[in-house]
Image: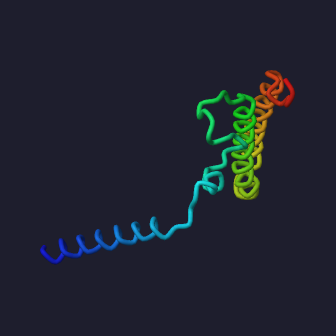
Amino acid sequence: MILMTMISFLIFIISNIMMLLSIILSKKSFMDREKCSPFECGFDPKSMARIPFSLHFFLITMIFLIFDVEIALIFPMILTFKMVNLLNWMKISFFFIIILLLGLYHEWNQNMLNWTN
């Protein structure tokens, strides 16, 4: 038990010394502040953090995710074409494609696909 405590204490001391050395020896200056700040979609990180965000970007992202998942579901459907009954496969595929087309029609009807609103 004492050995574990000593090893833990030694690791704690070594890690603190290494962090202190990195802070002392680093060459960061006030001029590098812009380089070290995170870049978030062209927003200025030094300004107000809660600026209004366009809802249109969010909708485009959701449409992309929906169609990305659609592709991930269609590929296995193609691979199982020869393994299952043709009539059942056609029913399931038709049902899946109809649902996707109805979703696309709904997005088109709500003007989500128009970039300029």
Q: Residue at x 63, y 36 (%)?
A: 47
Viewed as shown, does residue 63 lie left or right of 31? Answer: right
Q: Residue at x 71, y 43 (%)?
A: 41
Residue 53 in the image: above or below residue 90 = above
At which x and y percent is residue 57?
Answer: 73, 34
Q: Residue at x 39, y 67 (%)?
A: 20
Of 87 and 68, the residue lying toward us: 68
Q: Quadrant of residue 36?
A: bottom right
Of 103 and 113, the residue lying toward us: 113
> Which residue of the protein is positioned furthest toward the bottom in this rendering?
3
Of 101 and 60, the residue lying toward us: 60
Q: Quadrant of residue 79?
A: bottom right
Residue 67 in the image: above or below residue 25 = above
Dividing the image into 4 quarters, which one contains the C terminus? top right
Q: How is the image coloured?
A: rainbow
Dividing the image into 4 quarters, which one contains the N terminus? bottom left
Residue 91 in the image: above or below residue 53 = below
Viewed as shown, does residue 28 lie left or right of 99? Answer: left
Residue 99 in the image: above or below residue 1 = above
Q: Residue at x 75, y 58 (%)?
A: 82
At which x and y percent is residue 99?
Answer: 74, 33
Of 28 and 110, the residue lying toward us: 28
At which x and y percent is residue 29?
Answer: 58, 59
> Which residue of the protein is positioned furthest toward the left in this rendering?
2
At which x and y percent is residue 8?
Answer: 24, 71
